[in-house]
Amino acid sequence: MPFVNIKITRDGVSPEKKALLIRGVTDLLADLLGKNPRTTVVVIDEVETDNWGIGGETVTVRRQRGE
Amino acid sequence: MPFVNIKITRDGVSPEKKALLIRGVTDLLADLLGKNPRTTVVVIDEVETDNWGIGGETVTVRRQRGE
Amino acid sequence: MPFVNIKITRDGVSPEKKALLIRGVTDLLADLLGKNPRTTVVVIDEVETDNWGIGGETVTVRRQRGE
Amino acid sequence: MPFVNIKITRDGVSPEKKALLIRGVTDLLADLLGKNPRTTVVVIDEVETDNWGIGGETVTVRRQRGE
Amino acid sequence: MPFVNIKITRDGVSPEKKALLIRGVTDLLADLLGKNPRTTVVVIDEVETDNWGIGGETVTVRRQRGE
Amino acid sequence: MPFVNIKITRDGVSPEKKALLIRGVTDLLADLLGKNPRTTVVVIDEVETDNWGIGGETVTVRRQRGE
């Protein structure tokens, strides 16, 4: 019954990678906490780099500087 | 003053249906809990089926199997 | 499969009221959008009035003023 | 280490304004609470006006009425 | 830089289990998506069973029935 | 009408500091984006250090090491 929300920057992650991530997180919750995988929900949010800030700067600006 | 976030898969729900959902949730909070509808906020997130997992699989894959 | 998060101030809402709210939101999503109630998840967060701000003030302060 | 999520309606806010908002919120958390700006994360969600409800109505409908 | 929020029912999960969960999710994001583990944030919310609904019922009620 | 959710570790922030944070964020949104402060909502979540992970470790463990 867990609900997991994963926020990442929008960088063209493939559907196959997303499927592996969902499988991996669901398995972790089953293995570590005994949670029922059938009712585990995982939602991935992909966020534009202009809309993600860290260290007081957007990811867009950080990447332009080569970070 | 309540804040409600509703996450659903992106399936082309019409603006009219969204408006009915917002009205319905706002009324429920007023009727059951006495919350002021004027300051009740409802935000609907529509999520791609590749980004929504349940039972360790994406909704995309489940629908391809006919579920 | 929808996921709903409802944030309200912590004001001693009874378990019975919470159950009615969960039932009501689940039914709305089934009736309006055809969502399967069996996999609809609703999570209620109760927030201290010191931690909820509206209009630039905490709810604690607003209530002290009689609002 | 704080995490801040800001939801606003999608109204064409420029990358420069978003950058200023991220900088401002990060500075506030450093100045008021002593939080390390280097690990402060700010994520901005821009929401369609059809998907944002207040007072039981969508923002789309309210704006059509001139509010 | 990913941000992960995990919501589970409050059932007395030990700090050691939580640490393993945080480690596991962080490693998954590094292994699958190449995300930097140093800036990956994971926040676990533990929710009272009265406040968690699935299938239109609270978890409290479902457990009383033996589900 | 913006909605802001601020997650910080639970470290005994005073009600006065929280009130300043709410005021500051509300003012920023008004000054930078022209948002109406009367309908701006800010919710602060305080999270136990066992439940907050960064760099694959809980904040509890990091603090024990003196970080």
Image (cartoon, coloured by chain):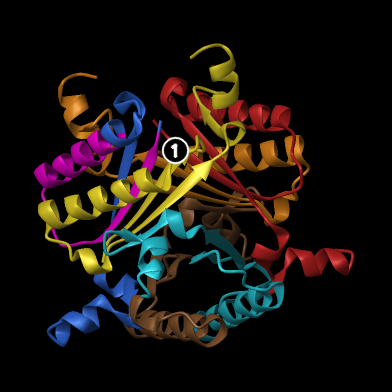
Chain colours: A yellow, B cyan, C brown, D red, E blue, F orange
- Quadrant position of residue D6: top right
Residue at 39% in and 40% down: E3
Residue at 35% in and 29% down: E35
Whether residue E32 is situated above or below residue C50 in the rendered picture: above
Does the magenta portion include E20?
Answer: yes
Q: Can you name the residue that lies furthest to the right here?
A: D66
The kind of residue tagged 1 is Phe
Q: Is residue B3 left or right of residue F39?
A: left
Tell me the element at label 1: strand
Query: In the rendered image, which quarter contains the C terminus of chain C?
Result: bottom right
User: Start and end of the magenta stretch?
Assistant: E2-29
Subunit of mark 1? D
Q: Position of residue A41 (x, y in %)?
A: 33, 61
Q: Position of residue C16 (x, y in %)?
A: 34, 85
Residue matched to label 1: D3
- Quadrant position of residue D44: top right
Residue at 27% in and 64% down: B55
Q: Can you name the residue that lies furthest to the top here?
A: A65
Whether residue E56 is situated above or below residue A37 in the rendered picture: below
Q: Which of C12 and C35 lies nearest the eye of the viewer? A: C35
Q: Position of residue A2 (x, y in %)?
A: 27, 61
Q: Which of A52 and F1 lies nearest the eye of the viewer? A: A52
Count the numbered circles shown. 1
Q: Is residue E35 left or right of residue F22?
A: left
Q: Position of residue E59 (x, y in %)?
A: 25, 76
Note whether residue D52 is visible: no
Query: In the rendered image, which quarter contains the N terminus of chain C?
Result: bottom left
Whether residue E41 is situated above or below residue D31 in the rendered picture: below
Note whether residue B30 is visible: yes
Does the magenta portion include A56?
Answer: no
